[in-house]
Amino acid sequence: MLEDIKKTLWAAADKLRANTDAAEYKHLVLGLIFVKYISDTFAARRAELCRRFADPKDDYFLDDAGLLAEELEDRDYYKEVNVFWVPETARWEALRAAAKQPDIGKRIDDALSVIEAENPKLKNILDKRFGRAPLPDGKLGELVDLISTIGFGDDPRLARDVLGQVYEYFLGMFASAEGKRGGQFYTPASIVKTLVAVLAPHHGKVYDPCCGSGGMFVQSEKFIESHGGKLGDVAVFGQESNPTTWRLAAMNLAIRGIDFNLGREPGDTFTKNQHADLRADFILANPPFNISDWWHGSLTGDPRWVYGDPPAGNANYAWLQHMLYHLKPNGRAGIVLANGSMSSSQNSEGEIRKAMVEADVVEVMIALPGQLFFNTQIPACLWFLRKSPNGSGSNQLPSPSGRGAGGEGTLGEGKTRQGEVLFIDARKLGTMISRVQTEFTDEVIDRIAATVAAWRGDSLPLPVGEGRGEGASKDKTQPQFKLPLPEDLLEFARELRQHSTDAEQRLWSALRDRRMAGTKFRRQHPIKPYILDFYCHELNLAIELDGGQHNTDEGRAHDEQRSRFLAEQGIQVLRFWSNDVFQQPEAVLQAIFNAVNGNLPSPLTPLPAGEGNHALPLPLGEGQGEGALDEATTSYQDIPGYCRSVKLAEIAEHGHVLTPGRYVGAEEVEDDDEAYAGKMQKLTEKLGEQMAKGTELDQLIRQKLGGLGYEF
């Protein structure tokens, strides 16, 4: 429904644009959408207050009707729910009533002025250009009528969500329409999502020194909310030099109820640093690539240039050092830069990069596909930087579970591998969404984030509802659990999920995302006092993978007790040896498929090693087959052609060049066991057939043209 609304609005708005430049028209449309939203939310709050003032059971009840009008004008009632005060002359109803008047542009400008006067937070943010808008007569009024069709509803939270999505959609569409100039204010959503997914900003101060229209902040807030946090968990700081784009960012954040500090005014980040004392937990940025006119004499000897003075002809290493300077100890940064930043040795860039690598502040490098950006075809990359308590690398700590790769991992704030850089080559992972535009799908973003998390030894933050007990059920056939589960049990489940065994991860690749006959499984799921390897709530089905330690008298007794307890809760248990997942994957999947479809004869126990069920083919289209178990595990491992963890000494051997393709190598090619000579014979025969067909077509074309009197 919302998608249809967005597309319909865009089509109509674009049609009204006539010959107006998209860069100009953008501000008219987005400005009116903003006014419509704050007017709607104001009206909804006013209606709510009227109801509450009239309800004798409500704390707001007024027994003197004469006070109603006065109370409705009390600004505090609106501020307490983060609703802007809108004077009567600026409300949407008044503007819509005057939409056909020749002075509608001036009326809108006047409305914006009084809104700013009543709401100091919006001072100098609203763009008052409607009176001089270069639109044909009547078009601005038509635009007002069009935007009047947007209904934001009575629920302020829902209204913010609807407006936010419409606003974000229009930003993206305008960026696409503007082409090169569009990229100055808009970073493609999939790039923003990738930065946020890898950094996982969930608390503290978030900073973007070149914030554009505020997309990094918006995606950070979405991440926090989707993982059970609150908007107030982060404080947003930003800076933007372009006055128009600065206003876009402020409106973009204001409509979502995000508290922000974008500085007193637009300003150059290098020469007018408006957050000089800020030390941020997370920094996300997409600075302009390779800008050459950034230097000013006042920047000589600036304390931000810890690793060397950046060259006056290119700001790339100024941005990197600016962000490192503004990170607090344990802070992390993610930055989009041109590919040249990874290898350039012009002027002082090579020396600065060497100093950064040797200081162990470079954590992850990701090469991106081409055609991701609206404004440039320059190949780009992602830099992820870190700052430890001592200002450089990070100390490695053992994993309490001991189940990570080699029994070790890293924990705590700022946790990472010391003396290594993770390289990811994602150049082939883009998906074309138009003839000129590429993006990362959510699946690719998840893969990249999971790779980095596994390398760091982190557990990925789970969306709301994941990894928690299901709660008590009134259905007596369902297991009964008490909420909340003990925090120590939940924490242990998170640790197990973080350090999944290879067998668990391989089986999870076949169960996740409803891949097994449309059934939802969860992994490392806590059911007091146990944690199940895999669990399907709707079927009361548990799957347990057992290693060699279970093949002892003590292990078997423990498993029997565990299965008996789960059976008493109405849960059926499937048990497999871990090595069966690798040696007989089809048999394992067939047994699970049978259980999912109600064919489970009784709770199973693992057969002795090597004596699993015979492999049976899965029904056509069901399950994932053996190939589904071939994905990378969450205990990190290098994957040729995709990712590799590299020691600083090896990077030094390559002149401190940080291009992922230099380190990850070529992806493995599956050997089809066909002899080279035989393969070449087949290809040669095929080529001969195609060439003969081409000659035949050439002759036919000549004959046809000859018949028309065209000989050659």
Image (spheres, rainbow, N blue to C red):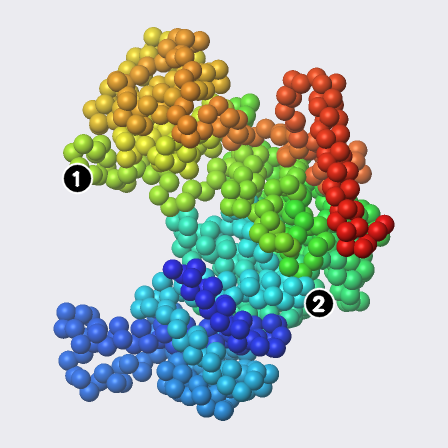
Residue 210 sits in which quadrant?
bottom right
Is residue 474 shown above or below 402? below
Q: Is residue 31 left or right of residue 361?
A: left
- Within 10 Å of disc 1 (Cα), the crowding (few <14, some 14-19, many 20+) is few
Depth check, mark 1 against mark 2: the one in front is 1
Residues at marks 1 and 2, CA–CA distance in whole angstroms: 64 Å
Query: Circle 1 sits in a helix, a strand or a loop, which is it?
Result: loop
Question: Which residue sits at x=26%, y=72%?
Answer: 48
Is residue 325 shown above or below 471? below
Residue 687 or 538: which is nearer the viewer?
687
Residue 702 or 667: which is nearer the viewer?
702
Residue 583 or 406: which is nearer the viewer?
583
Q: Is residue 533 visible?
A: no
The percent coordinates of residue 414 (x first, y second) are 56, 42
Question: Which residue sits at x=64%, y=38%?
Answer: 424
Q: Is residue 180 left or right of residue 622?
A: right
Question: Which residue sits at x=60%, y=77%?
Answer: 20
The percent coordinates of residue 7 (x first, y second) are 47, 63
N-term mark: 1 or 2: 2
Question: Which residue sits at x=48%, y=23%?
Answer: 626
Q: Which residue is mark 1?
A: 474
Q: Is residue 682 left or right of residue 244?
A: right
Check if mark 1's residue and mark 2's residue have beta carbons within 8 Å.
no
Q: Which residue is mark 2?
A: 271
Q: Is residue 416 visible?
A: yes
Q: Is residue 656 left or right of residue 269?
A: right
Is residue 10 shown above or below 225? below
Is residue 160 shown above or below 144? above
Q: Amino acid at mark 2?
A: Thr
The percent coordinates of residue 623 (x first, y second) are 41, 29
The single residue placed furthest to the bottom in the displayed view is: 102
Query: Circle 2 sits in a helix, a strand or a loop, which is it?
Result: loop
